[in-house]
Image: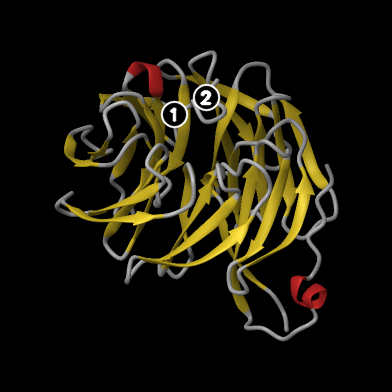
Amino acid sequence: MPWKRSSASSTFLLFCLVAALGAPRSAMADYAYVTNQSSSDLSIIDLERMTEVRRISVPGMPAGVAVSEALQAVFTVSPDSKTLRRFGLVSDLPEIERQLDGGPIGVAVDETRRRVFVSDWYNARVWVLTADDLMLTATLETGSAPAGLAISPDGRWLATADRDSDQVSIFNAETLVLAHRITVGERPFGVTFAPDGRIFSADVGSNTVTAIDPESGVILGKAKTRERPYGLAFAEGRGFVTNQYDDTVSVFDATTYAPVAVIDVGGYPEGIDTTADGLKVAVANWDTNTLSVIDARTLKVVGEVATGDGPRAFGLFLAASVQKE
């Protein structure tokens, strides 16, 4: 199981944040829900104020996370206790939790069909559960050591990064039928869909990013990264990749795959996601216990916020939440 630096790999009460801080603010703000594996908790960070507003206990060393505004829920995966949890964005208790016998790590939400997918690192499969009550409904066969999961923007495709098989599996998200298995770079760990629907894998063993057309299963191109790429995000027509062993984010042109820039962030960056307006990219830095925020246009780090110990934020961890004044 890919924990710690050598890898490439519970009560939840979200009060009215403005009232808690005691000052006026705009009606819309982005929040980051960062899983801290070493301290077994969840940092809730207000990205407008650039401050942690709450830290919640999540037992079992959580790694995977998926925020769903449509379902008003945050899903976390704790590999150490083999537990999937669903927290309500505004409720005072976890709605439900489910033990999964295997090696759960990654999580993704199919909002249209109200389903949750969780990768099983040890058993080359993906669990399919109902989002409302976390009841297991099916399992999907993948390659060896599936880690990252992603749902396409149009809801048509589910992609898994099968690390030890050097491949990406692509499923029809409606029927759950396997559509393609595509050989990519070495040891893909993170997988993400670009806004236009292309799949991108972060290949930690070959220091590459591979672009795939999910419809045809054809590889469209590759981009070079620095050492040990982990996660990907997209903004302003560019791809952003965290490089674990380089303490940087590689930026490439999402059309040509040509390198654009390398941005210094905190130590051992892992999870990465884009704000709702597409103007900022947030990066969880495992070694320095921080969240870096990058301006997607200027490619400069514009802020840094302290988190818990060992932030991973493996998945989609940002949400634009409407709060009253």
Residue 281: quarter of image: bottom left
Quadrant of the snapshot with the C terminus: bottom right
Query: 241 left or right of 224?
Result: right
Which is more toward the observer, 272 or 192? 272
Q: How far apart are marks 2 and 1 (CA)?
A: 6 Å
Q: Can you tell which mark lies on residue 182?
A: none
Residue 180: x and y in percent read 29, 26
Residue of label 1? 8
Please count the marks in the image: 2
Q: Which of 57 and 148 is in front in this view?
A: 57
Is there a contact, CB below 8 Å, between mark 2 and mark 1?
A: yes
* Tag of residue 2: 2
The amino acid at mark 2 is Pro
Identify whether 196 is placed above or below 227.
Answer: below
Type of amino acid under label 1:
Ala
* Residue in the picture at 60% in, 76% down: 28
Residue 123, percent from left and from top: 53, 13
